[in-house]
Amino acid sequence: MIQHHPGEELLLTLAAGHLDSGPAVLVDAHVERCASCRAQWRQLQAIGGALIDDAEPALLETHALARTLERIDARDGTSNANGSIQRTITTPRPPLPNGAIWPRSLHGSTISRWRWMGPGMRWSRIELPHEPNASLHLLRIAPGRSLPIHSHDGIEFTQVLCGSFDDGRAVFGPGDFDAADGNVHHQPIVRDSGECVCLAYVSAPLKFDSKLAAVIGRWIGM
Ligand SMILES: [Zn+2]
């Protein structure tokens, strides 16, 4: 049962096509899996569509359509000069634990192999076709292991693909979404029930308490 959802403002930004590709991948991945957010997102899209129908063309943000098309391209392939869609050749992906499913929002992305970052902890870098520099990662953490204590200079979005963790604020399980900012100082600890794989987006490097963790964070790009 999904317990933690993106806020309405975030869903509205997504529905309006105004969310940057990096964070949009995570919110999309949540909406894909969460029936209640999907229903809310459809309503918000309908409201947005009605507003666009009523608006003067000149009032529309010129980049809104381009951004929406970019996101569709990113999901479904890439447009060539004639405007037709070429299916993206699927690149190899690292294996996931049993029961975990790749979100559709990662379609067309390049996803690196699993890399070691500490005992029982691995990471993978995700490059989006239209925003390759977005700080987007997969983290795969063994049961009982914890990430280093950290805070944030920007925002951190997390979408749980499988397993669960407890960061002292709450337990986040499969399908849960979390948004953390500079007010949150936490240490996610993976519960003993199984490996945890999360999608993670950060808008700015994390602020680690430990110097070693800061070095590893810089190496990974988080
Ligand atoms: Zn939800």
Image (spheres, rainbow, N blue to C red):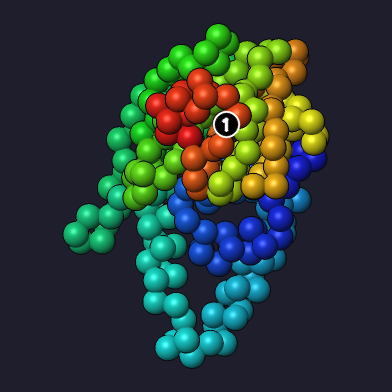
Question: At 42% from the left edge and 45% from the top edge, which residue is drawn?
Answer: 134
Left/right placement of residue 197 relative to residue 4 reads left
- The image position of residue 107, as x and y in percent, is 43, 40
Report the front residue among 51 and 134: 134
Quadrant of the drawing holding the N terminus: top right
Mark count: 1
Left/right placement of residue 17 relative to residue 65 reads right
Report the front residue among 10 and 103: 10
- The image position of residue 54, as x and y in percent, is 57, 87
Question: Residue 220: in sight, yes or no?
Answer: no
Within 10 Å of the Cα at label 1, are there few (<14), some (14-19), or many (20+) other Cα atoms?
Answer: some
- The image position of residue 201, as x and y in percent, is 53, 41
Query: Farthest residue in the left direction?
Result: 81
Which amino acid, mark 1?
Answer: Phe
Question: At 70% from the left edge and 33% from the top edge, which residue is drawn?
Answer: 186
Report the front residue among 42 and 173: 173
Question: At 69% from the left edge and 27% from the top edge, which residue is drawn?
Answer: 188
Looking at the image, residue 44 lies above or below residue 221? below
In what element is the residue under mark 1?
Answer: strand
Question: At 69% from the left edge and 37% from the top edge, which residue is drawn?
Answer: 185
Badge 1 is on which residue? 208
- The image position of residue 57, as x and y in percent, is 44, 87
Question: Residue 147: in sight, yes or no?
Answer: yes
Query: Farthest residue in the top direction?
Result: 119
Left/right placement of residue 190 relative to residue 27 reads right
